Amino acid sequence: MFKRISTLVSLLALASMMLAACGSAPTEAPAATEAATEAPAATEAPAATEAPVAGAPEVCATDEYGCAVFKPGESIKIGMGAPMTGDYAAFGIDISQGAMIAIQDAGDVNGFKFELVTEDDGGSPEGGAAVANKFVTDPAIVAIAGHIFSGATNAAMPIYEKAGVPMMSPSATNPDLTKQSSKVFNRLVFTDADQGRFAAEYLFNKLAITKLAVIHDGSSYGQGLAQVTNDEFIKLGGEVVDFTAITPGESDYSATLADVASKQPQAIYFGGYNAEAAVIVNQMKQSGLDGVIFFGDDGTFGQDFLDRTAANSEGTYSTSLVPPASEARSKFDAAYEAAYQTPAGKLSPYTWTAYDSAASLIATIKSVAILGEDGNLYIPRSALVAAVRSIKDYPGLSGQVTCQENGECASSGPTFYIAKDGAWVEAEK
Amino acid sequence: MATESKVHKKNISTYKIVQIVLGVLFGGYLAWRLYQILIANPVYGADTWLRFAIAGIILGSVYALVAIGYTLVYGILHMINFAHGDIMMIGAFGGYFVFEGLKNIPAPTSADPGLNFLNAHPVISVILAFVVGISIAALSGYFLERIAYRPLRNAPRLVPLISAIGASIFLENAAMLMFGAQRRDFTNPTVLTRGEGWDLPVGGGTVILTYTSVLTFVLSIIILVALYLLVQRTRMGRAMRAVAENKNVAALMGINVDGIISQTFILSGALAGAAGVMWGIHLGLVYYFLGFIPGIKAFTAAVLGGIGNLPGAMLGGLFLGAVEALGPAILGIDFQLKDVLAFGILILVLIFRPTGILGEVLSEEKV
């Protein structure tokens, strides 16, 4: 009997503990956001107290978020929230390495050096919010060269917004991010919507295609891209003769392709990844699509696609973030390889935009930084936020960077490549 | 008594009437669509129809080969060997490694010092690939039966089914661990380059009849005929049919039942192996998950044709291939829906003819 009661009691205790655990979870979340709201107060505090001190420029007293103050010998910090562990670690490592090169190239402003602070956000929204909360409590962090994934970026944005810390993401492509009228969020990477628009324009204007067939793999990435390209191509005045889907993972699409061939397109735009793209390209000739141009997205770009298709891929197009060859790019590539013993672009295609985002932030910080009469360096925060948003004609590796009012800074768009003799070469502009 | 049987008869006749009405409706719709698409409002030219037909026949002949493996095993053990598709994958890997190996053997001639064995002797290479692929797959079939099914011979019918699913998952993961998860390209001899073939001028266009598709089709027909003769004309085939009819009586007649069951698994493994090598040569991709979808499709084909029935499996395979390639075109729907169509037809067949197209009405004992 006693035993039974004790089991009952322990069961009850267990149940109450579980209930308590469940109950405490929602109360924890507001605590985290409270920290976020407190954070700007923490950063403002030193500025507010130091503002009356002799030597502080007047702008610090009027700036909404105050100034970041650096005593001689301190370095100006740029934050980087990136997945450094787990499945997507390659992206985070590569992007922070690209940004690191920009820090090395940055030099100094009035003797104040720059420093990159990398924190692991795991690429997840929770990680993004945690890293952002950590960053905004450090008054020396004035700008963020991230975040990397759209989900983490989305969670981090409101936290930086309250603290007045500008962001410049090299890789968050979700189109919705710039539709939230955030003051601080900017990005250097083109979105899927941009990619579709540029592809449609290239097909219609440059390749003079009037009859296009669009194929996609049904994934949110592939289908979204295919839909944008389809709409833009029609808007330009072209005719989309077929808009069809394939089942990913199969190794025979010849019936689908024969159906497409019967509509007699001049080119095929494909939204999807390289596994299916390779199968399609290999079966085009036997399906009656001989001589039809295959135009792929950035999911088809890479050596793997060329290896699988050999001679069949000759003359196919692909899209990539990889910037066109230039002197600045080869200088970066050499510096990257010297520093990390891997060729740039091997880990991810975002290393160049990562360099550009850090470098453009550094240039903007230099332009707004004020050397006080007391020898301290003052960076007015809201002036920096506005300055980043109004970056104009900054010469980056990926082209001239100009930010629009919504924070889209990737004016250059994607680069198109054509397969020639088993290698991707830049297609004519 | 008499009224009861009358009621019974009446039930059957209403069911029959519903069947006939639905059949006529469906047939009428099909005829109307055919009229629409061929005469009234032709969407496709003759060249496109021929391309659809080629794609369907090739796919269908591979399905048929795999389907026969299901049917043979079902006929004898009354179980579905769900690991059959993965045996096909093993065969494809066998052929793949033969070609990779031969590619690295130099066979220089005076004309071309860089020539390798694969291109110097393509016929021998292809034969070798088939021999190795078929042998490995047959061996896997034998051991599959010894390890996964024989210990469960007298267990309830669901048990070997679960064991089969387990064996399938095991084989897939073993292949992934051994060969990696990436898709590999099946390198053919240059004379068999995929996409190259004879040009047929048809209806204003040119249809390419590829060498690999001709090879696939001809080989599978030869194999199917040989198999039919084997089952119908040889002692082994007679023993197999006897075991399928009734294991106990066959044993009483002096037939080694376990031996025959082993032989059946070897035979069905060999067929799957041949299908795997053909799949590799014709479509050019091998990876650990290759057998899954053809396996499911071939199982469908076997049920469609009447499981346990050899000509039925062949017919079911070809029919399914044709439905996948031609069905969406005839009905004017998106090609992504070909699987919906294939399985939809399976459901229709099972409703109206539960034993499949060629399936005989099974006796109580056999069921």
Image (cartoon, coloured by chain):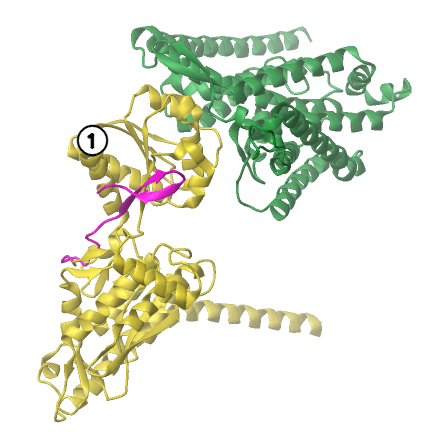
| Residue B319 image point, x, y percent | 53, 16
Tag 1: Cα neighbours inside 10 Å, few (<14), some, or many (≥20)? few
Q: Image check: A111 left or right of A56? A: right
The amino acid marked with disc number 1 is Ala
- In this view, A132 is above or below A349: below
Q: Image check: A297 left or right of B79? A: left
> Exactly how many numbered labels are in the figure?
1
Q: Which quadrant of the rendered structure holds the C terminus of chain A?
A: top left
| Residue B150 image point, x, y percent | 79, 35
- In this view, B216 is above or below A46: above
Q: Which stretch appears magenta?
A: A403-429
Q: Is residue A274 magenta?
A: no
| Residue A334 image point, x, y percent | 36, 62
The quadrant in which residue A98 appears is bottom left
| Residue B285 image point, x, y percent | 53, 35
Q: Which quadrant of the rendered structure holds the N terminus of chain A?
A: bottom right
Q: Chain letter of disc 1? A: A
According to the picture, the residue beneath numbered tag 1 turns out to be: A208
Does residue A166 appear anywhere in the picture? no
Chain colored yellow: A
Does residue B237 appear anywhere in the picture? yes
Q: Image check: B142 left or right of B304? A: right
Frontmost residue, A180 versus B52: B52
Tell me the shade of chain B.
green
- In this view, B174 is above or below B243: below
The quadrant in which residue A226 appears is top left
